Image (tube, coloured by chain):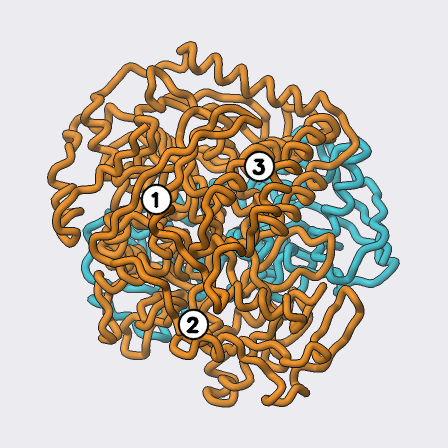
Chain colours: A cyan, B orange
């Protein structure tokens, strides 16, 4: 199949950026979307031109490196699919596609489709962990966790930190990402001692990083490749309120 | 050069405890006087950096990804082994030790393997305490599954993303140390060389992948947790960025590279579907618990996409015309034979014309029987996300039609040589996780990579590095040493050269050419003639690369082509050592199958009399034959025998 791509090109954070148009001809339906871009890039490279910069690593939908907007939809919009796992059989000959980076004040564009998501790391550093030292814990089966509980915690822990939630939100809020970590640990017995301290510290760091406020649009969850539920946001809000009632100070 | 393992003698069951008491400890008040560089943030690197930070050392931790959480350990699916005996099925530390030594085809160091089995239980305790959501039973206890090469159920798992959950656990521990100021994290920073001062590893040269800035970092010791070299084959299950650069640059500075020919081919990956393919996707080995592997008995029923030959719909092939070749050949272990055995059996079926995918390179993995026995819901519970992934990539639904699978390069057992303390022959250079060679011998059992990475990172290196640091004491540190200046100069020169060629061929085209040849002649089966061909071809490709590669752009910006070019240039040197090692080892063992050395039934035939050693190679120059050093292996507990899974 033959495709036309309008791709956002931007040389660096201070460059204004612009769209450029490329033809992708002779594409196989078995290719992944990124393999299609490899194909376009290989041609650019052999002509000595700068290839389109996009992030990717595992190409199995788990590392969270990849992600950009295709026609305004994060990862292309296919349910539970990162862009590295999106295949060309979802497109048809003659399609015209627009590729843009995640757009959010807290995710500055570094180059083309590559953005800086280090704010996510800072949110986790603020308290997204259980304080336990290497080598001193008790036997694993001494902590009993019901299957239903651990399954809910797992569903929240499945977040890959790709940033699609922020890019899809009209407010560029990071509540789904932050809430996923808060819920993962808050649903488990191991996470209880630091539960309220954690929710305050993480949400405060999130606000300081320049993400917008959550106004319950739900776009984040709709475009999340790991199907993280809006429940994590509800839990975060509940815990935040409980933390204030308990009068704990943030850590 | 005499390679001393420094493994404690005497009773193996008390060896690690005795060793921990015998080695030196750094006074807690002095730990802050030391700085340790840790390269890599995978299971080994993140666990080591976090633990060293907790102990009070200053840690500089590097990764080329944009976040520490994205290291390739994250992609591990199936599980992690531990000798907990929670199932009460007769497991023990000794049994895990035994299975691992045997599974590695008697080419690993017994003392290292015993220690690995011994600390395996601590890893599960540690991960659970961190909040890793392992699968559990309704009563709240941890659940287990079986994996290849073992008759007990000792694998802990978190659906099909055990690697991600364990890595996030380590990343969280690391994040805590970053907040406390004990670990300084450098993301998007690639190590390009090792700096040796006065015979000791004292620093690294890095490139900032956003600004292109070349930087010098000095420390009291350097730890490499930089993963394996599977991408030497271009197509593998590794991440696109996985590379051998850090390890190879260390090798070029004098560290010995051990057993580079020991690579693991994983039996259950999605087959290749065309020439454009950039990587291969693994389907967890756990699928073999409930899936049955087969191929059509009749080559007329086989299916070849490349030739447009449709064959027969697998669902229409009657039982009598199916060859469940693993169950037929290995009745005791059946579909749960170790990876090397399962891979070779699939290759043989395809060589015999029974293959069922692009170019006839695939066999079926069928769930119909288990869906009938357990119900679709139970199967979905166990493998739902894997089935979904398979469908996304191939367009086929495994609930309706059998999966097609084929072996692919997955892991590398070889790596930098280390002693029992995980120290290389270069003082102050430590190597952990997949980057070292130590624990898996010639074949790694499923669910043992996560175990080794975390064991090295949480429970071994943090103690053994103290022994080195306490001996050398706090020393002055400066990035103005001549050694830094010289190595940085060499790094810059190489970058300039890559940018100045301005040739016509893309970096990937060279990588693909190298990889296909490696797969053909140094993959699942190897022989003298093929390996000799490779030794002529690799220098030719390398020469062409340095004449005709196209690297657009400059060094002072984001330049992904330049990053790849540097890595491919290293693969073009390193693979020669791999091939030499494969040619020198005139026996078959584990993942190293030399066609000239097989039993009448087509199984690997070891030669313990002549090859019961670790082959550690010393770099002597590009295009110059490296020098072989041997560390003899002694088996005091598990006596080498012909591996049998029948």
Dot 1 falls on a residue whose secondary structure is strand
Q: Going by the image, does B140 lie left or right of A46? A: left
The chain letter for the residue carrying disc 3 is B
The tag earlier along the polypeptide, 2 or 3, is: 2
Q: Does residue A130 show up? A: yes
Q: Tell me: residue B185, above or below residue B471.
A: below
Q: Tell me: residue B95, above or below residue B58.
A: below
**Between residues B159 and A112, which one lies in front from this camera angle?**
B159
The tag earlier along the polypeptide, 1 or 3, is: 3
- Dividing the picture into quadrants, the one containing residue A223 is bottom right
* Badge 3 density bin: few <14, some 14–19, many ≥20, Cα 10 Å: many
**Between residues B360 and B490, which one lies in front from this camera angle?**
B360
**Between residues A246 and B637, which one lies in front from this camera angle?**
B637
Q: CA distance from mark 1 to mark 2?
A: 28 Å
Do the residues marked 1 and 2 share a common chain?
Answer: yes
- Residue at the spot of label 1: B613
Q: Does residue A192 show up? A: no
The chain letter for the residue carrying disc 2 is B
- Residue at the spot of label 2: B336
Give the number of the disc on residue B571.
Answer: 3
The chain letter for the residue carrying disc 1 is B
> In this rendering, which labeled residue sits more in front, label 1 or label 3?
1
- The residue shown at (82%, 40%) is A20
Please provide percent x and percent y for residue B456. Answer: 31, 45
Do the residues marked 1 and 3 share a common chain?
Answer: yes
Dot 3 falls on a residue whose secondary structure is helix
* Badge 2 density bin: few <14, some 14–19, many ≥20, Cα 10 Å: many
Q: Tell me: residue B560, above or below residue A201.
A: above
């Amino acid at each position: 199949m033959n495709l036309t791509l309008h791709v956002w090109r931007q040389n660096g954070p201070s460059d204004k950026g612009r769209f450029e148009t490329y033809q992708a001809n002779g594409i196989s339906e078995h290719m992944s979307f990124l393999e299609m871009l490899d194909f376009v890039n290989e041609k650019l490279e052999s002509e000595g031109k700068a290839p389109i910069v996009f992030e990717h690593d595992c190409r199995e939908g788990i590392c969270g490196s990849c992600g950009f907007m295709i026609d305004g939809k994060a990862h292309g919009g296919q349910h539970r699919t990162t862009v590295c796992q999106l295949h060309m059989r979802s497109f048809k000959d003659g399609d015209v596609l627009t590729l843009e980076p995640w757009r959010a004040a807290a995710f500055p564009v570094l180059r083309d489709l590559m953005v800086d998501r280090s704010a996510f790391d800072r949110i986790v550093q603020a308290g997204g962990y259980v304080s336990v030292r290497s080598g001193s814990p008790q036997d694993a089966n001494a902590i009993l966790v019901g299957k239903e509980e651990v399954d809910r915690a797992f569903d929240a822990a499945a977040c890959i930190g790709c940033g699609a939630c922020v890019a899809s939100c009209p407010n560029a809020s990071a509540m789904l990402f932050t809430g996923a970590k808060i819920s993962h640990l808050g649903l488990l017995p191991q996470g209880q001692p630091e539960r309220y301290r954690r929710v305050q510290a993480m949400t405060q760091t999130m606000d300081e990083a320049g993400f917008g406020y959550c106004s319950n649009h739900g776009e984040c969850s709709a475009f999340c490749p790991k199907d993280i539920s809006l429940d994590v946001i509800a839990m975060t809000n509940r815990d935040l309120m409980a933390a204030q009632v308990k009068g704990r100070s943030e850590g | 050069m005499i390679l001393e393992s420094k493994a404690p003698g005497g009773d193996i069951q008390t060896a690690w405890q005795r060793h921990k008491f015998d080695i030196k400890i750094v006074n807690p008040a002095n730990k802050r006087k030391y700085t340790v560089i840790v390269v890599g943030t995978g299971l080994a690197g993140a666990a080591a950096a976090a633990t060293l930070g907790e102990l009070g050392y200053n840690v500089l931790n590097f990764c080329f990804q944009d976040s520490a959480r994205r290291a390739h350990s994250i992609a591990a699916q199936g599980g992690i082994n531990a000798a907990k005996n929670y199932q009460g099925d007769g497991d023990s530390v000794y049994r895990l030790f035994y299975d691992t030594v045997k599974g590695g085809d008697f080419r690993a160091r017994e003392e290292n393997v015993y220690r690995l089995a011994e600390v395996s239980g601590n890893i599960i305790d540690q991960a659970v305490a961190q909040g890793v959501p392992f699968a559990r039973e309704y009563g709240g206890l941890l659940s287990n599954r079986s994996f290849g090469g073992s008759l007990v159920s000792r694998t802990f798992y978190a659906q099909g993303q055990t690697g991600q959950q364990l890595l996030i656990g380590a990343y969280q521990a690391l994040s805590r140390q970053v907040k406390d100021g004990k670990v300084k994290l450098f993301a998007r920073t690639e190590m390009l060389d090792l700096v040796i001062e006065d015979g000791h590893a004292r620093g690294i040269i890095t490139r900032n992948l956003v600004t292109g800035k070349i930087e010098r970092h000095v420390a009291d010791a350097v730890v490499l947790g930089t993963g394996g070299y599977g991408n030497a084959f271009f197509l593998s299950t590794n991440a696109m960025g996985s590379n051998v650069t850090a390890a190879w640059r260390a090798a070029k500075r004098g560290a010995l590279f051990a057993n580079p020919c020991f690579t693991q081919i994983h039996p259950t990956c999605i087959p290749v579907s065309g020439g454009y393919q950039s990587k291969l996707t693994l389907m967890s080995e756990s699928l073999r618990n409930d899936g049955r592997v087969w191929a059509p008995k009749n080559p007329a029923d086989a299916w070849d996409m490349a030739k447009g030959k449709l064959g027969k719909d697998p669902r229409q092939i009657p039982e009598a015309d199916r060859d469940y070749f693993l169950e037929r050949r290995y009745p005791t272990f059946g579909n749960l034979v170790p990876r090397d055995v399962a891979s070779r059996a699939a290759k043989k079926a395809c060589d015999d014309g029974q293959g069922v995918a692009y170019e006839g390179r695939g066999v079926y993995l069928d769930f119909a029987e288990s869906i009938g026995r357990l119900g679709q819901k139970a199967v979905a519970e166990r493998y739902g996300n894997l089935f979904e992934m398979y469908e996304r990539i191939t367009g086929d639904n495994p609930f309706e039609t059998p999966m097609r699978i084929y072996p692919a390069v997955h892991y590398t057992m070889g790596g930098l040589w280390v002693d029992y303390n995980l120290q290389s022959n270069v003082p102050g250079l430590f190597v952990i996780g997949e980057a070292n060679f130590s624990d898996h011998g010639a074949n790694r059992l499923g669910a043992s990579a996560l175990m080794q990475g975390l064991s090295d990172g949480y429970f071994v290196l943090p103690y053994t590095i103290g022994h080195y640091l306490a001996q050398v004491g706090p020393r002055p540190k400066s990035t103005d040493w001549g050694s830094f200046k010289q190595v940085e100069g060499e790094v810059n020169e190489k970058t300039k050269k890559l940018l100045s060629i301005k040739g016509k061929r893309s970096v990937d085209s060279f990588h693909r050419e190298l990889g296909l040849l490696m797969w053909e002649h140094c993959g699942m089966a190897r022989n003298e003639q093929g390996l000799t061909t490779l030794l002529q071809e690799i220098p030719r490709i390398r020469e062409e690369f340095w004449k005709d590669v196209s690297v657009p752009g400059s060094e002072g910006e984001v330049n992904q082509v330049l990053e790849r070019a540097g890595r491919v240039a290293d693969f073009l040197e390193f693979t020669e050592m791999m091939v030499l090692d494969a040619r020198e080892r005139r026996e078959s063992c584990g993942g190293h199958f030399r066609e000239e050395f097989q039993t009448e039934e087509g199984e690997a035939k070891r030669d313990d009399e002549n090859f019961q050693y670790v082959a550690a190679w010393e770099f002597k120059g590009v295009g110059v034959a490296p020098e072989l050093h041997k560390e003899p292996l002694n088996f005091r507990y598990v006596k080498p025998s012909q591996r049998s899974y029948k």
